[in-house]
Image (cartoon, rainbow, N blue to C red):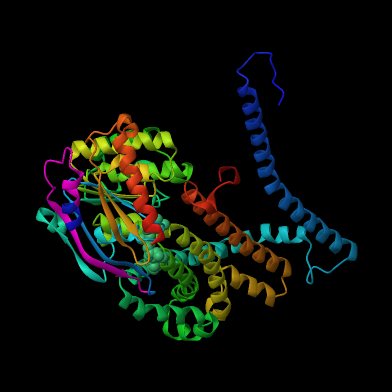
């Protein structure tokens, strides 16, 4: 390692400072590439798409150009926006219910084996029955259209939270459990200080899956609700546009749905890495390991 | 019990004032695990109040198992374990345990890990702070109070675990190879700290180690174990001064006991 002697610092310092600066530069480059590369690929694909449509004169009711989709997005913004709001309400409502009920039931399950025997199979039945097959029943018994959609999205989002949280609560380190026992911890203390923090990574993993599933549940529910769900969320706008061969609008609605999914995923991933960054392997940057 | 009585007068010299009153007695204790492993068989052991008893023996001979039985984390499959006097009431018995692994909560900072036993007893954070910081200082980790366990080395984690056990000022301290991961200097320092605290506070210590010299330096008595199934092969009284110093480590008495212990250990291992 060369040592620059101009301001005569102690020998070790320039080397470490240099190394730190180098590491910093690397990290910045890494962060830049992480965003720049996918952006470039997507931009390239959109350009190809635009080029293909214009050079081949593809009619817009078969494949609209990206520019046309953008037009539709701007033109129909009022209608699409209200659809987006409704879809978001259903999605986040379902996710909220899934989290509160999932965590509560998971805690109940881990407190008593009998409760686990009694309840867990029901949760599995809810999970393995395809929601599309259950929906006609919901359609008959539930009047309110929002309640219908909410229930449907909740059923889909609920299970990953329940099963992951249960697994997390049960996988507290054996030695730590012994330590709590030795110091005479109550059930509540063991739950509060040992099981809940230990279950956090599992719960957050479940939450990330449930976030995506809640959106899928909301969209599928609108699809199967058919005319009953007309004029509610983005999915019903999408179906309607399909019937009327307003393909640019269909693409615009699809774009918004997919954007919603991305935003949900990124938000939950961000929350999870923030909550775990100080201690869990999954959330540590590579330099920290 | 019988061995203690038989040995004590023979060691003669400055016999400790009297045989300490028993605190906990193991009577023909056996432990067979669910998978059929016979870890212990016919263990007779009396731990006197205020004793510093080391358990020495080959790997897998059941040392950790004995500590787990005494702490009631496990129950024996044969024989019984009796606590005497006030310690007979589990609620009034303060037992601390340093496990063979550091056993820290990865999501909690060093301070909170050491605070845990007191938090579980309902002691407020502010009230507990001086004791916690004192314990951290004695293991040389006061500067790391806000660090997470993953930011510590293996030996540092072990020292946090030791601080956690010391902070509560227990009546009985069970230590399972607490210093195995430490360098010699730190180890000697912690040996002396432990002896000082044991002397000042009148703790009863049960200490598992693989080092003959460490056991002789620390203990008032050494129980040498044999394995498969584990039992106590020999009980050796260490009649050194109560305050041990570097001088004791170099004394003739020390090497004589170390040799005896070493012989007992090799006999136990070949048995
Ligand atoms: N939970 C368990 N289930 C089955 N067998 C066990 C269990 N715990 C310990 N054993 C067995 O009991 C025996 C004694 O184990 P123990 O941990 O007490 O040994 P040890 O003397 O502490 O060894 P070391 O010095 O290596 O720590 C071993 O043979 C081990 O395989
Ligand atoms: Mg052991």
The outermost residue toward the right is A55
Looking at the rendering, which quadrant does residue B146 occupy?
A: top left
How many numbered marks, from 0 up? Answer: 0
Closer to the camera in the image, B103 or B207: B207
The reply to whether residue A101 is in sight is no
Is residue B16 covered in magenta?
A: yes
Residue A71 image offset from top left, x and y in percent: 72, 58
- Can you say whether B68 is above or below B222 in the image? below
The reply to whether residue A110 is in sight is yes
The outermost residue toward the top is A7
Q: Residue at x 47, y 48 (%)?
A: A279
Q: Residue at x 21, y 69 (%)?
A: B79
Looking at the rendering, which quadrant does residue B2 occupy?
A: bottom left
Q: Residue at x 52, y 80 (%)?
A: A131
Closer to the camera in the image, A21 or A262: A21
The outermost residue toward the left is B85
Residue A117 image offset from top left, x and y in percent: 35, 80
Residue A65 image offset from top left, x and y in percent: 79, 62
Closer to the camera in the image, A289 or A46: A289
- Can you say whether A136 is above or below A166 in the image? below
Q: Is residue A195 left or right of residue A204?
A: left
The outermost residue toward the front is B10
Q: Is residue A83 left or right of residue A48?
A: left
Q: Is residue A240 left or right of residue A110?
A: right
- Can you say whether B113 is above or below A263 in the image? above
Q: Is residue A157 left or right of residue B158?
A: right
For the record, the magenta segment spans B7-34
Looking at the rendering, which quadrant does residue A243 occupy?
A: bottom right
Is residue A206 covered in magenta?
A: no
Quarter of the image for the N terminus of chain A: give it.
top right
- Can you say whether A195 is above or below B172 in the image? below
Residue A252 image offset from top left, x and y in percent: 68, 63
């Amino acid at each position: 390692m060369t040592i620059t002697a101009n301001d005569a610092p102690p020998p070790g310092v320039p080397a470490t400072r240099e190394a730190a600066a180098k590491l910093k530069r690397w990290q910045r480059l890494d962060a830049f590439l992480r965003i720049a590369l996918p952006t470039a690929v997507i931009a390239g694909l959109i350009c190809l798409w635009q080029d293909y449509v214009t050079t081949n004169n593809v009619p817009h009711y078969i494949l609209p150009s990206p520019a046309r989709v953008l037009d539709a997005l701007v033109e129909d913004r009022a209608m699409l926006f209200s659809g987006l709001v409704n879809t978001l309400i259903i999605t986040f409502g379902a996710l909220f219910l899934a989290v509160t009920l999932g965590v509560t039931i998971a805690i109940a399950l881990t407190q008593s084996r009998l409760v686990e025997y009694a309840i867990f199979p029901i949760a599995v039945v809810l999970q393995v029955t395809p929601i599309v097959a259950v929906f006609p029943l919901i359609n008959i018994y539930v009047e309110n259209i929002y309640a219908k959609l909410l229930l449907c999205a909740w059923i889909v989002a609920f299970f990953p939270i329940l099963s992951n949280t249960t697994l997390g609560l049960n996988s507290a380190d054996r030695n730590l459990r012994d330590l709590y026992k030795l110091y005479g911890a109550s059930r509540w203390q063991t739950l509060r200080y040992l099981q809940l923090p230990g279950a956090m990574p599992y719960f957050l993993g479940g939450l990330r899956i449930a976030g995506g599933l809640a959106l899928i549940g909301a969209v599928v529910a609108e699809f199967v609700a058919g005319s009953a769900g007309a004029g509610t969320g983005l999915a019903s706008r999408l179906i309607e546009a399909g019937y009327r061969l307003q393909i640019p609008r269909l693409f615009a609605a699809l774009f918004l749905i997919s954007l919603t999914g991305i935003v949900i995923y990124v938000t939950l991933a961000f929350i999870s890495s923030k909550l775990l960054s100080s201690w869990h392997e999954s959330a540590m940057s590579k330099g920290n390991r | 019990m019988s061995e203690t009585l038989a040995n004590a007068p023979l060691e003669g010299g400055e016999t400790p004032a009297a045989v300490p009153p028993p605190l906990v007695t193991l009577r023909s204790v056996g432990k067979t695990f669910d998978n059929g492993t016979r870890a212990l068989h016919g263990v007779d052991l009396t731990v006197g109040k205020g004793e510093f008893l080391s358990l020495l023996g080959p790997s897998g001979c059941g040392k950790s198992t004995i500590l787990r039985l005494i702490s009631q984390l496990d129950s024996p499959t044969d024989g019984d374990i009796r606590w005497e006097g006030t310690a007979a009431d589990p609620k009034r018995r303060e037992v601390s345990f340093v496990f063979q692994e550091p056993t820290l909560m990865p999501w909690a900072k060093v301070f909170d890990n050491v605070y845990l036993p007191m938090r579980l007893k309902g002691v407020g954070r502010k009230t507990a702070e001086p004791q916690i910081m004192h314990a951290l200082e004695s293991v040389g980790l006061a500067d790391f109070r806000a660090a997470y366990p993953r930011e510590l080395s293996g030996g540092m984690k072990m020292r946090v675990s030791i601080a956690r056990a010391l902070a509560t000022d227990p009546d009985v301290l069970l230590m399972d190879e607490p210093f195995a991961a430490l360098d010699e200097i730190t180890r000697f320092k912690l040996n002396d700290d432990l002896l000082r605290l044991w002397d000042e506070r009148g703790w009863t210590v049960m200490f598992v180690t693989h080092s003959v010299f460490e056991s002789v330096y620390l203990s008032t008595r050494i129980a040498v174990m044999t394995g498969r199934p584990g039992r106590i092969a020999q009980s050796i009284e260490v009649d050194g001064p109560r305050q041990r110093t570097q001088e004791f480590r170099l004394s003739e008495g020390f090497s004589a006991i170390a040799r005896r212990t070493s012989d007992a250990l090799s006999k136990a291992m070949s048995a």
